[in-house]
Image (cartoon, helix red, strand yellow):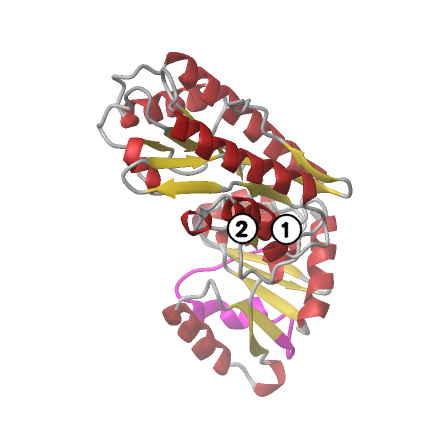
Amino acid sequence: MSERLDRIRTALDAAEIDALLIGSAHNRRYASGFTGSNGWLLISRDYAGLATDFRYVEQAAAEAPEFEVFHFQDRLAAWWKDFAKPIGRCKLGFEADELSVAAHKSLRDANAKLTASRRPSLVQTSGVIERVRAAKDERELDCLRRAAQLTDAAFAHARERIQPDWSERRTAWEIEQYARTHGAEALAFETIVASGPWGARPHARPRETAVGESAPIIIDMGVRIDGYCADMTRTFVIGDADNRFAEIYDIVLAAHDAAAQLVEPGMTAKDAHAIAFNVIEGAGYGERFGHGLGHGVGLQIHESPHIGKTSEDVLVENSVITIEPGIYLPEWGGVRIEDMGVLTADGFESFTSTPKLRMG
């Protein structure tokens, strides 16, 4: 974790703050290794503290050896003075995107009780840790690769067994059973199985409806291993595909392949999105591709960068992203094709190995 702390401390300089208070569970885990459900990190250039309650003191000491563990009891007002003592008077950032109004009030009120000479000034910050998290280290990349491999295996297991009379929910359950009995700690998100017109809803939830024959079936799925997520989507039919499916699938595949070949570090996220969007728009379906091309994946299934038409994010080397264009037609269904992989100096390296259909 020392390398991560170094990167975070560099990020403090960029954010023009002296210390950062972290309450977000994912940012807390990333920075310290602590996986408990309750706690705060306080990181400055020369201090790293982890405050938690009785339930997690022993766990915190084991999982976050580079942090001084602070055992708190009662409300923030009762212990903030002691926890904040090592940083003294400074510019203290807090995660404005993560802190509730009530929590912010508690922090502000507790901080106001400190003497002026020892009182940090509170500064709103946004995305300080998230931007650091965007570039994955080797341990993270290993976890993400393994999560992608198990996702591929779970899909293959279900694809070999699925029958037209299976419901969408049964199909999703087949995937989940395989994942959990083959090493997944959890699913990365609720599996999407959407057949026929239901597939026109990009985030449709599985129903008791049979998947049927000759209609497009979208399966969007991923598992979590050691805290890290995977994300993959495939669209297929059971039985014979009609001409419309072949047409739509080929357009989406061309958009996917164009983006996968051309994305690179330093590119803006909106320019990456435009690669795929222009292919789909050129085929006459631009209005039916309404979501972003993709997103970052790590400890969260959706994290920095956001790859969409209005995103100001810039793609960085060693970020793990998805490429997932789609076309969605009401009363017919949808097609989405998604791979997840790492962005290297040479371009996009997919972690997803599940084959795609080749309609030609």
**Spatial distance from mark 1 to mark 2, Cα to Cα?**
8 Å
The image quadrant that residue 162 belongs to is: top left
Up/down of 25 relative to 128, above or below: above
Q: Which percent across, then down, holds residue 166?
A: 27, 19
Q: Residue at 56% of width from left, 85% of height from top?
A: 115
Q: Which percent across, then down, holds residue 325?
A: 50, 42
Q: Are marks 1 and 2 in contact (CB under 8 Å)?
A: yes
Q: Which residue is mark 1?
A: 134
Sequence-wise, the earlier of marks 1 and 2 is 1
Q: Along the line of sight, which residue is nearer the eye, 268 or 228?
A: 268
Left or right of 44? Residue 281 is: left
**Residue 71 seen in render:** yes
For the view shown, which residue lies furthest in the right direction? 345
* Three-letter code for the amino acid on which mark 1 is drawn: Ala
* Three-letter code for the amino acid on which mark 2 is drawn: Glu
Q: Which residues are magenta?
A: 67-91
Q: Residue at 55% of width from left, 30% of height from top?
A: 147
Residue 68 in magenta stretch: yes
Q: Which percent across, then down, holds residue 314?
A: 66, 57
Q: Which residue is mark 2?
A: 303
Disc 2 element: strand
Q: Which percent across, then down, holds residue 134?
A: 63, 51
Quarter of the rendering occupied by the C terminus = top right
